[in-house]
Amino acid sequence: MIYDREYFSKIIADKILKNENEIYEQFNSGNKISSFIIDELLPVEEATKIYNSFPKPEDMKVKKSLREYKFIDAQLNKHNKILEEITYAFHEKIVIDAISKTIKINGLIADEQLYAGGLSRMEKGQYLNPHLDNSHNKDRSLYRVLNLLYYVSPNRKIEDGGNLELWDEGPKKEQRTIYSKFNRLVVMITNRDSWHSVSKLEKGARCCISNYYFSEKPLTKEDYFHITSFRGFPNQYIRDKVLLLDIKLRMGLRKIFKKGIVDNSHVYKK
């Protein structure tokens, strides 16, 4: 069996189209942060193989600050080939077309550079604070519109932490928790109100394949721009104030330097 992107993409597209009505209903259920879930995305043996191929923490880049603490890597050619193939399976036309048809969003464009995407691994004690993803791609030419998260860590329980949290009413209200279940794909909208986070890991490792889709136009009527913006969790009063100041300062710099002053290394350099 050849586990390449063509093979994976056919399975994924077929799964989406077979669950088209349910996915549409999930995505349009009335939550402010539209999202849908597909369980058992791939055969168990293949999902397990992807997990077993994930790099160890020492072979990844660590991001640690008040905003986040996790391991990442977008340079996929350093690792087992299957990781690049499953990541780019979501870039195949049949997958993009299936998602577009199902949720009725046209003009979706996959990000070949994997800007802020690729591999993500979180271990005990790590976290991702409530945040908005950068509104645009690396060159600020396209709007970020969908976030695709494929979880591959087996035997996880919801109480183990590392779950996706969607803050439909903003980061000071109650969150909606989506369990980072093995072999589960979560797709969520990204816009200027799509606050989301990852709860602190209490046990084990949470491994995830991350992709973004972009569009030439925003999903809202108005144009907008924002940097990746972090807030504190509701019980983090001081951290929240510091992060609000951080947003203000970095947005001020972006008004002067349109593409930023630091080259973001979280991309796939081919």
Image (cartoon, rainbow, N blue to C red):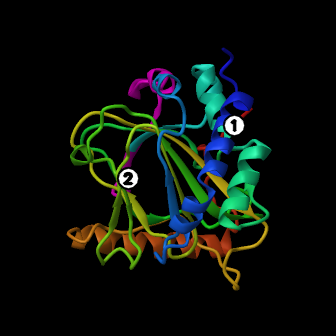
Mark 2 or mark 1, earlier in chain: 1
Residue denoted by label 2: 68
Residue type at tag 1? Ser
Viewport quadrant of the N terminus: top right
Residue carrying label 1: 9
Give the residue at x 75% y 64%.
Answer: 215
Which residue is depicted at the point 76% across and 53% down?
A: 97
In this rendering, the label closer to the viewer, 2 or 1: 1
Q: What kind of element bears circle 1?
A: helix
Q: Residue at x 26, y 47 (%)?
A: 158
Q: Judge left or right: residue 73 versus residue 93.
A: left
Please check the rendered image and state whether residue 51 is part of the magenta-colored stretch, yes or no. Answer: yes
Q: Is residue 214 visible?
A: yes
Q: Which stretch appears magenta?
A: 49-69
Q: Nearer the viewer, residue 35 or 236?
A: 35
The quadrant holding residue 118 is top right
Q: Is residue 115 visible?
A: no
Q: CA distance from mark 2 to mark 1?
A: 31 Å
Secondary structure under the numbered disc 2 in the rendered image: strand
Report whether 138 appears left or right of 245.
right
Q: How dense is the environment of label 1, judged by Cα within 10 Å: few (below 14), some, or many (20 and up)? A: many
Q: Where is 243 relative to 121, above or below?
A: below
Q: Which mark is residue 212?
A: none
| Residue 101 percent coordinates (x, y) | 73, 60
